[in-house]
Amino acid sequence: MKNVLIFIAGFLTGIVTLTVIGYAMNSSSSPEENNRNFTLFETPGNCISTNDFEIFQVLDDYHALAHEKDEELDIFTGPIVLFRNETPNSFYDEQRIKVPDGKCVRQIGVYKYETNLGSYKTVPVVCIMKK
């Protein structure tokens, strides 16, 4: 009887340990790893633009969709892009993303999503880097 209780205790301890390890590994993953809609490149791609962008939709604490903004004409130009938040600050609607001199918006991946109308879109994932 004693051996059966030791076996059951060991078995339950193993299950609890595996559950805790699995939860810890899942919670330490980045948002991109948890979301299969992201495909990040191993190396950054080409520069897309040196113009400023304006956010039109915040997806979560780490990501926002934005349009390129032509300052002279005060209109949106270029493609829609997804910015990754690599700072402790949060994105907000109509936030202006300024591209400093000597830097550009460089593609680092792609993001696929479904619009409210049910169509699917694929946009570049970008960040500001040196030219």
Image (tube, helix red, strand yellow):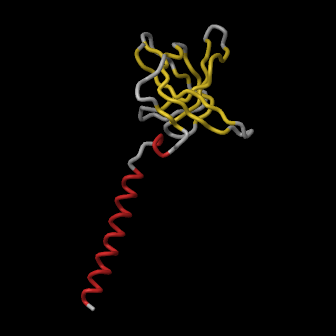
In the rendered view, would you say 106 is above or below 86?
Answer: above
Q: Quadrant of the N terminus?
A: bottom left
Name the residue furthest right: 117
Q: Quadrant of the C terminus?
A: top left
Residue at 37 percent across and 55 percent down: it is: 24
In the rendered view, would you say 18 is above or below 41?
Answer: below
Q: Determine which quarter of the picture holds residue 74.
A: top right
* Residue 18 place in picture, x, y as percent: 35, 63
In the rendered view, would you say 77 is above or below 108?
Answer: above
Residue at 44 percent across and 10 percent down: it is: 101
Residue at 42 percent across and 32 percent down: it is: 87
In the rendered view, would you say 115 is above or below 18?
Answer: above
Number of numbered tags placed on the structure image: 0
* Residue 69 place in picture, x, y as percent: 61, 17
Q: From the viewer's perspective, tell me whether residue 24 is left or right of residue 74.
A: left
Residue at 49 percent across and 23 percent down: it is: 107
Q: From the viewer's perspective, tell me whether residue 11 is left or right of residue 117.
A: left
* Residue 21 place in picture, x, y as percent: 34, 59
Name the residue furthest top: 72
Q: Determine which quarter of the picture holds residue 119.
A: top right
Please name whichever residue, 85 or 48, is drawn nearer the observer in this view of the structure: 48
* Residue 7 place in picture, x, y as percent: 29, 80
Q: Determine which quarter of the picture holds residue 8.
A: bottom left
